[in-house]
Image (cartoon, rainbow, N blue to C red):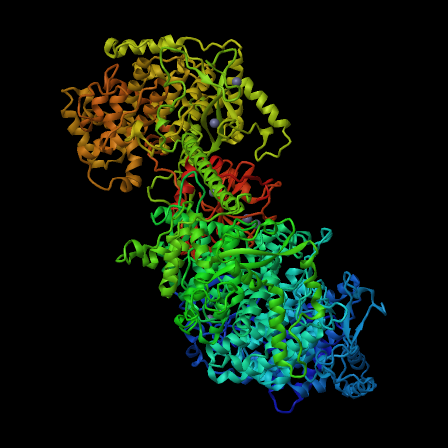
């Protein structure tokens, strides 16, 4: 039965089966199953088309599948879009609408939704994704599009059962077939390409089947729910394909099932059946319940694989991988899988086949079904460990990672779902276990601290797992689920999980250890550091920030307590494992302390938000001391790295230091470290802390008052910068408030100010540089409303600047003046700088501000800032400022400074003063007065007794015992002379003089603390033997103890330093003594900007204000006139340092001045070169012509430097750039620019462009008239003409030749191609490609200048004619003539052949003739365009360029003279005389000549002028112009007459006849009437009346409008002619105020209007006429020319007669305001040539053509489409907008350049490649600049970075 069905037509078979099936007897179902047995038989290949067709027909139940689809779709009630996309898809993200940050929308839904004003961006999907529209768990309902608003679907009825019946029966079988296929096709890959190919083949074969399933999922909810039932049902799976039912007879099924089992085993998985066996084995091994790390560390748990060496691959570098012999690995998570439904097994295979794209898409397409989503999520979690294991092994881990995340993001972003699987499927346990499992595979022994006895293990950053970031999908999933509050809570409540997590974090603690190289330069710079930083940030810090977001309120105190506890436990374990006591091992540093940072950040949160008591979270003092050590070590190492002490470790160590402070890392690294140090400082003994700092920075030995010392730990060259580092660190520690009390917006503000002070920033740079502070998830998202508000509060926006020749700047933000004044904080800048030069740059900018505002003119010191109030929990920190140790250090440094000791610097003094001032601003609460009780002299002979800085400042130190080398000056010094009255006191005090050792001090304190903590041992405060190696070097035998007489207090030292800094004795005098009433000096604002003296003064004022005692002391010190006596033998080192700084500053200033000078020189040079309104441009306008007239022109050769005239033998030439141009051809009639089409309805037609119009005209003429005559009646070159421009520099042509030769031999790669004759001007570097010879001027001829009126027109006409008769003589062959020929060749070669040969006979001289005068025409017309299209501004026109037209005309004339115009055809005769009408019947076969009325007058003028002998006399030129004007006027009237309606024509004809009497030759009415009469003789007007006129004549013509229209008709000719006259004869162009005056002005200039006195705006076009013969007669003659030929082309007469010479200025297409308009239309548009959507679409901005950039699809003979179009559209110049990048490229010949973008975001910035995806808006200024460069042909000169495109664009 089934077999018979198989033979039937599929559709009818399906229909009858469906009918059978709907009966209750079940016979139909049986029949269907039989049929399916055959169709879906495993023996049949899945790829067979029949199989799928049968399936489709059966599912459709007799309908066509497409109809079935439509029917089902109609019932779709899904409210989710769920569109799944793959990589590179353009999608949107709206932060305003999104609940989850992962939310994304497809373009359709985005555009259909309401997101105006939202914070959204467009992005190109990397891993693929799915549209979330309609999913209210991911985004707010308000952002849904209309289609997916939930209300929209309520009215849709549910699907009738009958429709889906067949699917219910068939789909289980289809899925079964799929699974069978997957099982059969699988074989374990053995890293062998053959099996990989096999897998690919298997996948390919099932492609049609998957496509069918995908189609079904897209039909909507109905089919998806059937599929869900099939996929998730346990019974169906069990019945169909589990091994249970396999009996002997079903051999295929059995074999198939066994393959599945084999695959499971091959993956290291067991089913639950086998589980019991394994667990027994595990227990026998006795290794299941030990944790990997902890108290038992060190008992041999680790098992170094080096002994066994069984696996050579495991050795990575020199480090030996460590394997833990057991782990937390839970076998039920890692090793067991049991499949209970199709979905589970399908996912299993999806993983095995490494996530084939099609399968993934199918599985994701099902997600809109809620039941499926839950089932699939659970299945995914079930396979999670397996997925990650497969990922680690995969060769294509990148692709696979993307696909995994593509799925997991869809599942885990949903909080409800994530919570459910966390609870039901142990998601958290699985993730943490898998993370541990992953990292366990690459552990090595830590070498930190005590290499021998270190039992800590860390990840090896050199392993591929870390280097390739393979773990990221897992980490990103983990972070994703932790963002859900409910999930995070579960994590924080589960102590087991927390413990496991801390274990995981400790794998990163101390990784990537650096050891300082002391001798050899490291031979191999390991690049593992970035992997280490990335790992800490992603695997440790990100989850930490995730957890912290859920610990924000008091109610969550418990969580914080737990985390802190486990963190401290882990830290304790770590200290134990690395065998740490109290001293860090020397010359080691690791930047990775994630445990410290976890502790620090939870602590900070606890104090800030949870009102927890700090002390309750702190460990004991010993632990605190240990915790301080490693972060402090990093700070000291930073200073060492900047002091170049790590140079031998290579550049990478600098990379680490930079990454550590860089904006993306700082809030997870340096900020927590500093905070932890601040906590330690606030709780530890301050003396201990301060001495530890100086010891870590290795500057202890330096801190002696002796003039000489030995330093065991540091080379002398590093001492100064390390001391600076130590002091700077203390300043940062004491003034930074990021975690100590600043609010989030204060922090953001401070960060912003710091970045802006370093440099002006673009918005995006600033976004990138501002850390999301202090907590990346705090909600202060960069780019948010909040951020923008802050930005506008602190910065001014500098809009992008446009200079035609300059670089295009982007919008910048610069600090407001108030910010410089009050907020600039050098400490913040230092903290956030990667490079030290950034600090300098901030200081330079600060200095600039002070100078500019007149606040301070010297070299300012970093301003001192008051700090935000300290959170009371940390107020212990300020004890640092009030401890004896620090005061001794400060005193010592002040003393050394005043004594000019070695290695002191202004920076050190600055920091010392800063610390003193901080101390004065943060006095301890106990009153100062109490301390004053000690009296004046009581403790003057010893170090300080108290701790208050205000008191100690005043304390006088008399003697100090120092240890010095025997050579030191102190040793030889005699004791004070016996004359001194208090010898006894000396003896006494020398006994009590203090020796102070910082190291000893620290040890003593340490011991004290330890003793306090441990009750068992009462030890002496002596140095412990273990650390004795530290004291040994400083007590070398050469040192002796000397007693130094000091007799100074800090106050007296400060006052001395004031003298020193000001360079004047007694420069300081307390102001309150001068003028007790003046309080203005106390104004803190005035005191904040200044140099060192200002700082000292400020401190003294503060000191005086704090205590009366101090005030008196200051007065006393100042009254003593005792000058400070620095030891004379000491060359002033300090002064030197200061001098050096000053010198450096001066050098910088000098350099800047030079640079500025250079820049301005360059600029003025640019101006002359580009003629940007430079004052001398007019003078130099015409080289040659504007020179003095009575002497030969002298040219300077820019190569040899000699000057001289250009001669026949040694000609000089102008440096020129020849370039083909179609700019004029793109002009249009309408003044309204064309819009770029952005929809299918809009189109651009080329018909109305100038180029097309001229092409049509010449073709029309050639159809009816003699070819040679046609070629003299028009101009060409509108498209592909040659434009000649010069920089104005001249050179000897022979010099140029040798120059080119030298360029050719130059090995340096040129950006231009010398072989093509390209070079750059040796003087101005402007791009050029030829040399235009200068014609030697014969000055005598120029001076012939006859008064105008002297000859009659008639006489002149005859003279002209005579001259024309003269034969064009071949010039004698000279060097000059050769060069003129050669440049002509260059000109011709510049453009393509098709733009030269317009004649019917290719290569005929007529073509060349036409081409040559057209070159002149084009250059005149272009100059007119550059002058703005008219000559109103005349000579004053600002945008004119240096012109070489005069020279060009000479060259053209020389060549054109060679063509002799047959006198019979010379138009001159027909223009000036009444002749017999040339009998057109002479030769019948030949076509007639072009009638004069059809001719282009400007072309005629050029022909006449250029074929005359040179130098042309001006009177002859004027004569020609006059004659031509008559013809032009006639043309104007004829054109006009055609525009009249029939009635008007009759009326004008009649009214004109009446006026024939008076001055008829100059009456337009008479002439008009006459022409109408003449032309009416033919049928000419009849043709016109029909269609055209109705368009043309819109209104009734008045005499005024007629005059206006005639003037408009004549103006183009007058303009070019005036320019020609200007260039030929060098007379200045006139100018006028109003456009109406232009006609009269030019007519007078050309000599058409006799009286220039006549007010030019009254100028009448007819008054310019001067007829050589009777006007009416010659007009009749001209009209008859038309009439005689009119019969042959009656329908074209109109077109040919009506000439419209007016064109609007060339312009680019008008672009839409919003870039998205372009992007949406064009990024998916198909190319018309290949009908594919190009990968890189581009758009011609000249004509709107859409092309495939770089596409092979549209390549023609190795030319890609873009290049090809640039040749066709712009004769080699093309301007293209790259759609996907928003960037414009310019193609010029064989070169191209990236021009930039004309679309900017709201911050005035480009977004190349649309990376940020923010809305972009047209910057019309930039677009104008682009257009300007196109019109003026200056792309080559202005844009700098050109490259060859090899036709590949
Ligand atoms: Zn969508
Ligand atoms: Zn939608
Ligand atoms: Zn939105
Ligand atoms: Zn020369
Ligand atoms: Zn030049
Ligand atoms: Zn184009
Ligand atoms: Zn194309
Ligand atoms: Zn193409």
Q: Which residue is drawn at 58% across and 29% down?
A: 1316
Q: In this view, does 1280 lie above or below 798?
A: above
User: For this view, does 376 lie left or right of residue 256?
Assistant: left
Q: Residue 543 versus residue 663: which sits nearer the camera?
A: 663
User: For this view, does 764 lie left or right of residue 1363?
Assistant: right
Q: In which quarter of the image is the N terminus?
A: bottom right
The image quadrant that residue 1630 belongs to is top left
Q: Where is residue 748 in the image (x, y as percent from the top left)?
A: 44, 64
| Residue 1289 visible to the viewer | yes
Q: Residue 140 versus residue 353: which sits nearer the camera?
A: 140
| Residue 347 visible to the viewer | no
User: For this view, does 1008 lie left or right of residue 1597?
Assistant: right
Q: Position of residue 1817 (x, y in %)?
A: 40, 54
Q: Is residue 1025 above or below residue 1373?
A: below
| Extreme residue toward the bottom, this view | 25
Q: Where is residue 711 in the image (x, y as percent from the top left)?
A: 64, 55
Q: Position of residue 1814 (x, y in %)?
A: 45, 59
The image quadrant that residue 1543 belongs to is top left
Q: In this view, does 362 lie above or below 1612?
A: below
Q: In this view, does 427 lie above or below 625?
A: below
In this rendering, the count of numbered labels is 0
Q: In which quarter of the image is the C terminus?
A: top right
Q: Residue 1528 versus residue 364: which sits nearer the camera?
A: 364
């Amino acid at each position: 039965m089934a077999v018979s069905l198989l033979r039937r037509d599929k559709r009818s078979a399906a229909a009858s089966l469906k009918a059978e099936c709907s009966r209750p007897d079940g016979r139909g179902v049986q029949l269907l199953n039989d049929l399916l047995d055959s169709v879906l038989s495993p023996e049949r290949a899945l790829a067979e088309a029949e199989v799928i067709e049968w399936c489709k027909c059966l599912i459709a139940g007799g309908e066509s599948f497409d109809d079935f689809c439509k029917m089902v779709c109609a019932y779709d009630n899904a409210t989710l879009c769920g569109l799944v996309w793959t990589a590179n898809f353009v999608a949107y993200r709206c932060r305003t609408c999104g609940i989850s940050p992962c939310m994304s929308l497809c373009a359709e839904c985005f555009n259909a939704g309401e997101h105006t004003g939202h914070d959204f961006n467009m992005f190109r999907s990397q891993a693929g994704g799915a549209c979330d529209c309609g999913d209210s768990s991911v985004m707010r309902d308000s952002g849904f599009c209309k289609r997916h608003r939930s209300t929209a679907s309520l009215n849709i009825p549910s699907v009738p059962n009958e429709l889906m019946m067949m699917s219910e029966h068939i789909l289980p079988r289809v899925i079964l077939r799929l699974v069978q296929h997957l099982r059969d096709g699988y074989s374990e890959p053995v890293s062998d390409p053959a099996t990989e190919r096999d897998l690919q083949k298997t996948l390919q074969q099932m492609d049609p089947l998957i496509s069918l399933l995908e189609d079904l999922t897209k039909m909507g909810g109905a089919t998806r729910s059937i599929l869900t039932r099939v996929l998730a049902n346990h019974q169906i799976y069990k019945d169909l394909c589990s091994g249970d039912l396999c009996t002997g007879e079903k051999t295929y099924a059995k074999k198939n099932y066994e393959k599945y089992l084999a695959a499971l085993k091959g993956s290291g998985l067991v089913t639950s059946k086998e589980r019991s066996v394994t667990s027994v084995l595990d227990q026998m091994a006795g290794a299941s319940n030990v944790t990997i790390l902890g108290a038992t560390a060190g008992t041999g748990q680790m098992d170094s694989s080096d002994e066994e060496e069984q696996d050579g691959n495991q050795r990575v570098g020199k480090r030996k991988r460590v394997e833990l012999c057991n782990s937390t690995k839970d076998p039920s998570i890692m090793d067991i899988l049991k499949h209970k439904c199709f979905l589970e097994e399908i996912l299993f295979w999806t993983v095995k086949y490494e996530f084939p794209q099609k399968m993934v898409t199918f599985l994701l397409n099902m997600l809109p079904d809620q039941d499926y989503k839950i089932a699939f999520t659970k299945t995914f979690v079930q396979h999670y460990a397996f997925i990650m294991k497969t990922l680690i092994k995969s060769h294509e881990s990148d692709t696979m990672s993307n696909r995994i995340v593509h799925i997991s993001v869809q599942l885990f972003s949903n909080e409800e779902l994530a919570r459910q699987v966390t609870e039901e499927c142990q998601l958290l346990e699985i993730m943490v276990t898998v993370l541990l499992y992953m990292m366990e595979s690459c552990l090595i022994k830590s070498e930190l601290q005590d290499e021998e006895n270190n039992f800590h293990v860390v990840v090896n950053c050199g392993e591929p797992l870390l280097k390739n970031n393979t773990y990221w999908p897992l980490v990103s999933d983990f972070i994703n689920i932790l963002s859900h509050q409910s999930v995070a809570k579960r994590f924080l409540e589960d102590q087991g999980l927390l413990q496991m997590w801390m274990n995981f974090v400790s794998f990163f603690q101390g990784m990537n250890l650096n050891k300082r190289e002391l001798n050899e330069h490291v031979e191999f710079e390991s690049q593992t550091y970035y992997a280490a930083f990335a790992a800490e940030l992603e695997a440790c810090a990100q989850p930490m920030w995730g957890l912290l977001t859920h610990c924000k309120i008091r109610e969550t105190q418990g969580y914080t307590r737990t985390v802190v506890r486990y963190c401290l436990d882990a830290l304790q374990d770590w200290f134990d494992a690395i065998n740490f006591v109290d001293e860090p091992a020397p010359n080691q540093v690791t930047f990775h302390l994630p445990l410290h940072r976890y502790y620090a950040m939870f602590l900070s949160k606890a104090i800030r938000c949870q009102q927890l008591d700090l002390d309750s979270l702190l460990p004991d003092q010993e632990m605190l001391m240990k915790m301080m050590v490693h972060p402090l070590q990093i700070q000291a190492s930073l200073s060492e790295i900047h002091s170049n002490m790590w140079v031998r470790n290579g550049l990478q160590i600098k990379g680490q230091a930079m990454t550590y402070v860089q904006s993306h890392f700082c809030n997870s690294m340096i900020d927590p470290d500093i905070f932890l140090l601040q906590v330690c400082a606030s709780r530890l003994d301050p003396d201990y802390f301060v001495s530890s700092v100086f010891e870590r920075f290795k500057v202890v030995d330096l801190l002696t008052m002796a003039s000489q010392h030995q330093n065991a730990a540091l080379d002398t060259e590093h001492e100064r910068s390390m001391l600076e580092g130590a002091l700077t660190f203390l300043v940062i520690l004491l003034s930074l408030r990021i975690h100590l009390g600043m609010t989030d917006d204060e922090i953001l503000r401070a960060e912003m100010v710091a970045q802006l002070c370093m440099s002006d920033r673009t918005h995006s740079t600033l976004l990138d540089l501002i850390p999301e502070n202090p907590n990346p998830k705090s909600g202060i998202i960069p780019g948010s409303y909040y951020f923008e508000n802050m930005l506008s509060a602190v910065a001014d926006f500098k809009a992008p600047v446009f200079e035609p020749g300059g670089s295009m700047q982007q919008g910048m933000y610069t600090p407001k003046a108030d910010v410089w004044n009050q907020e600039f904080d050098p400490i913040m800048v230092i903290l956030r700088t990667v490079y030290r030069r950034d600090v300098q740059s901030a200081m330079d900018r600060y200095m600039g501000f002070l100078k500019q505002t007149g606040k301070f003119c010297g070299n300012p010191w970093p301003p001192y800032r008051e700090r935000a109030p300290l959170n009371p929990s940390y107020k212990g920190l300020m004890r640092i400022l009030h401890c004896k140790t620090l005061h001794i250090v400060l005193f010592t440094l002040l003393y050394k400074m005043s004594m000019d000791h070695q290695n002191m610097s202004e920076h050190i003094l600055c920091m010392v003063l800063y610390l003193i001032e901080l101390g004065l601003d943060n006095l301890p609460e106990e009153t100062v007065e109490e301390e004053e009780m000690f009296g004046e002299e009581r403790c003057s002979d010893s170090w300080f007794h108290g701790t208050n800085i205000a008191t100690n400042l005043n304390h006088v130190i008399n003697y100090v015992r120092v240890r010095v080398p025997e050579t030191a000056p102190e040793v030889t010094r005699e004791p004070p002379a016996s004359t001194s009255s208090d010898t006894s006191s000396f003896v006494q005090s020398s006994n009590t003089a203090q020796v102070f050792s910082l190291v000893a001090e620290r040890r003593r304190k340490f011991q004290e603390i330890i003793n306090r903590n441990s009750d068992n041992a009462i030890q002496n405060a002596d140095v412990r033997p273990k650390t004795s190696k530290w004291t040994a070097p400083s007590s070398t035998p050469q040192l002796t103890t000397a007693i130094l007489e000091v007799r100074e207090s800090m106050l007296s030292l400060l006052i001395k330093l004031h003298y020193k800094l000001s360079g004047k004795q007694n420069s300081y005098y307390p102001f309150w003594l001068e003028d007790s009433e003046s309080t203005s000096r106390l104004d803190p604002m005035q005191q904040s900007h200044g140099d060192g003296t200002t700082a000292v003064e400020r401190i003294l004022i503060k000191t005086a204000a704090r205590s009366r005692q101090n005030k008196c002391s200051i007065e006393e010190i100042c009254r003593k006139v005792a000058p400070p006596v620095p030891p004379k033998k000491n060359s002033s080192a300090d002064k030197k340092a200061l001098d050096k700084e000053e010198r450096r500053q001066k050098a910088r200033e000098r350099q800047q001045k030079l640079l500025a000078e250079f820049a301005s020189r360059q600029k003025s040079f640019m101006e002359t070169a580009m003629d940007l309104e430079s004052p001398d441009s007019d003078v130099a306008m015409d080289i040659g012509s504007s020179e003095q007239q009575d002497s030969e022109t002298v040219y300077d050769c820019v190569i040899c430097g000699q000057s001289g005239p250009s001669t026949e033998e040694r000609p000089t030439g102008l440096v020129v750039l020849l370039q083909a141009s179609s700019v004029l051809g793109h002009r249009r009639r309408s003044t309204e620019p064309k819009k770029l089409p952005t929809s299918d309805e809009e189109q651009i037609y080329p018909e109305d462009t100038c180029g097309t119009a001229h092409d049509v005209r010449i073709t029309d003429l050639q159809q009816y008239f003699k070819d040679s005559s046609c070629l003299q009646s028009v101009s060409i070159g509108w498209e592909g003409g040659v434009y000649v421009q010069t920089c104005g520099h001249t050179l000897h042509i022979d010099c140029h030749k040798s120059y080119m030769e030298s360029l050719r031999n130059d090995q340096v790669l040129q950006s231009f191609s010398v072989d093509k004759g390209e070079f750059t001007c040796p003087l101005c570097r402007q791009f050029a490609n030829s040399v235009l010879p200068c014609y030697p001027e014969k000055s005598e001829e120029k001076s012939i200048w006859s008064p105008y009126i002297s000859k009659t027109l008639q006489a002149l006409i005859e003279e002209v004619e005579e001259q024309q008769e003269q034969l064009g003589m071949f010039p004698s062959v000279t060097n000059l003539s050769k060069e003129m020929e050669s440049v002509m060749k260059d000109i011709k070669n510049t453009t393509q052949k098709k733009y030269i040969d317009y004649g019917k006979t290719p290569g005929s001289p007529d073509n060349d003739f036409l081409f040559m005068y057209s070159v002149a025409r084009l250059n005149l017309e272009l100059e007119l365009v550059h002058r703005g299209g008219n000559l109103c501004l005349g000579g004053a026109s600002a945008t004119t360029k240096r012109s070489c037209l005069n020279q060009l005309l000479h060259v053209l004339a020389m060549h054109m003279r060679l063509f002799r115009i047959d006198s019979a055809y010379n138009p001159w005769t027909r223009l000036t005389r009444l002749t017999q009408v040339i009998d057109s019947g002479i030769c019948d076969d030949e076509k007639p000549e072009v009638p004069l009325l059809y001719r282009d007058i400007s072309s005629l003028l050029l022909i006449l002028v250029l074929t005359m002998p040179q130098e042309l006399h001006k009177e002859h030129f004027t004569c020609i112009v006059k004659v031509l004007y008559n013809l032009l006027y006639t043309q104007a009237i004829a054109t006009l007459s055609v525009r009249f309606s029939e009635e008007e024509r009759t009326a004008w004809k009649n009214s004109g006849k009446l006026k024939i009497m008076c001055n008829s030759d100059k009456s337009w009415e008479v002439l008009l009437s006459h022409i109408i009469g003449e032309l009416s003789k033919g049928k000419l007007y009849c043709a016109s009346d029909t269609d055209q006129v109705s368009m043309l004549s819109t209104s009734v013509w008045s005499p005024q409008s007629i005059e206006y229209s005639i003037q408009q008709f004549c103006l183009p000719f007058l303009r070019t002619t005036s320019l020609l006259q200007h260039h030929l004869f060098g007379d200045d162009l006139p100018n006028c105020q109003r456009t109406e005056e232009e006609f009269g002005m030019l007519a007078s200039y050309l000599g058409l209007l006799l009286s220039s006195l006549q007010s030019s705006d009254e100028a009448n076009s007819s008054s310019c006429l001067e007829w050589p013969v009777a006007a009416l007669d010659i007009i009749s003659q001209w009209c008859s020319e038309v009439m005689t030929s009119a019969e042959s082309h009656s329908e074209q007469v109109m077109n040919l007669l009506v000439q419209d010479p007016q064109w609007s200025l060339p312009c680019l297409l008008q672009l839409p305001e919003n870039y998205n308009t372009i992007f949406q239309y064009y990024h998916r548009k198909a190319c018309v040539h290949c009908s594919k959507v190009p990968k890189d679409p581009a758009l011609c901005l000249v004509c709107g053509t859409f092309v495939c950039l770089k596409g092979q699809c549209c390549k023609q003979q190795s030319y890609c489409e873009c290049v090809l179009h640039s040749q066709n559209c712009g004769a080699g110049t093309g301007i293209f907008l790259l759609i996907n990048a928003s960037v414009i490229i310019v193609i010029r010949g064989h070169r191209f350049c990236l021009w930039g973008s004309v679309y900017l975001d709201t911050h005035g910035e480009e977004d190349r490649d649309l990376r940020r995806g923010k809305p972009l808006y047209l910057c019309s200024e930039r677009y104008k600049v682009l257009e300007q460069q196109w019109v003026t042909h200056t792309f080559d000169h202005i844009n700098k970075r050109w490259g060859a495109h090899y036709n590949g664009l």
